[in-house]
Image: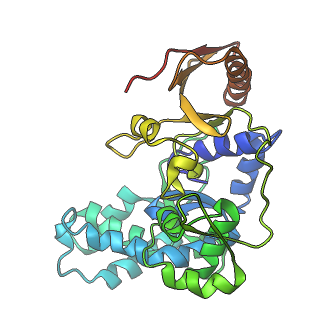
Amino acid sequence: MQSQVPRDPFVGLWSRIDGFGHAELDQLMLDRETVRMTLMRGTIHLVTNRDAYLLRPAMQAMIEKHLAGNAIVFPNLDGLDLEAVIASARDMLEREPMTGKHLGLRLGETWPDRDPTALSYVPRYVLPLVQVTPRGVWGKSQQPTLTTIEAWLGTTIDRYREPDDAIVRYLAAFGPATVADIQAWSGLSGLREPVERLRPNLVTYRDERHRELFDVPDAPFPDPDTPAPVRFLPRFENALLSHANRTRIISDEHRKRMWKVNGLVDPSFLVDGYVAGTWKLTQAKRETVLDITPFDAPLPPSTRAELEAEGQRLLEFFAPAATQRDVFIGSSVTA
């Protein structure tokens, strides 16, 4: 689950799993059965330990390229012995989890002529670091505090790995998909060759534009008439970000209204399986308000009723102790 915003995975799982509660995911994090770390597209994800060990080595080279690409941002790294910085940071973080700021200051004691922020980013791009709890636990607050996955879980991890298993893992969740879709989800490039290696163990289709789609065998295909109830999606949602062609879930026109120039994405909601608008939740001490803004208006009365009912359930999930929960459906978003 995409997890730049710590609450996003909770909303994403609540929308998918009937009866899901905060405590279920909290316990998985506290028991170290799931971890939050940098993975696909160089962004923070919450994944099971199994997926962490599968996905991080496949993404490692791509993540390290981000460090090289930020040479302009961190010019103070020129001529620096990066391996020495990485080794020193690993030793520090495995003895005591630290925030990025604290790590930079500690590294600056050894390299006082270097910028501490730049120093801290070297291990954060190269080492497989996890954000330790209580960061990410519902209702808890902590600055992102880092240690290595080896120290947190007690098992070594490969540094690099071919992407084949990650591709199959992706297709199981998001297939049928093109090679371009897989690359959009992962942030990796040049995936045609590994997909060709996997071809004998995959099934293929053609879409309406005659593009070749790949999928795992025996993947479920719901009947086209299967109901698609209203669903609320978090700000960063892999269902929206995991395909190069996003028109299967959102029109290009509506996507432009949601995607901001700074890379942020508004939380959204689905009607009949398609993104139909955005939402915003405001919490006070005893009152919680959900503002829903559809892309197109007016909404049919049945859709409004479904949104109001699902919105109340979302408010109960977010703020079970609130004495007042209000759902407001506003006018349509203007272009």
Q: Quadrant of residue 139?
A: top right
Please name whichever residue, 2 or 246, is drawn nearer the observer in this view of the structure: 246
Q: How many marks?
A: 0
Residue at 71% x, 12% y is 323
- The location of residue 99, given as percent across then percent down, is 43, 57
Colouring used for the render: rainbow
Residue at 72% x, 63% y is 33
Please name whichever residue, 199 or 72, is drawn nearer the observer in this view of the structure: 199
Residue 232 visible, this orientation: yes
**Above or below, comparing residue 257 to residue 119 in the picture:** above
For the C terminus, which image quadrant? top left
**Above or below, comparing residue 76 to residue 29 in the picture:** below
Please name whichever residue, 271 or 41, is drawn nearer the observer in this view of the structure: 271
Q: Is residue 305 left or right of residue 254?
A: right
Q: Is residue 239 left or right of residue 172?
A: left
Please name whichever residue, 143 or 216, is drawn nearer the observer in this view of the structure: 216
**Above or below, comparing residue 283 to residue 48 in the picture:** above
- The location of residue 156, given as percent across then percent down, is 61, 82
- The location of residue 180, given as percent across then percent down, is 48, 67
For the N terminus, which image quadrant? bottom right
- The location of residue 161, given as percent across then percent down, is 55, 84
- Quick one: which residue is furthest to the right in this view? 19
Q: Quadrant of residue 292?
A: top right
Residue 53 visible, this orientation: no
Q: Is residue 33 left or right of residue 259?
A: right
**Above or below, comparing residue 120 to residue 85 in the picture:** above
Residue at 83% x, 39% y is 19
Residue at 39% x, 39% y is 256
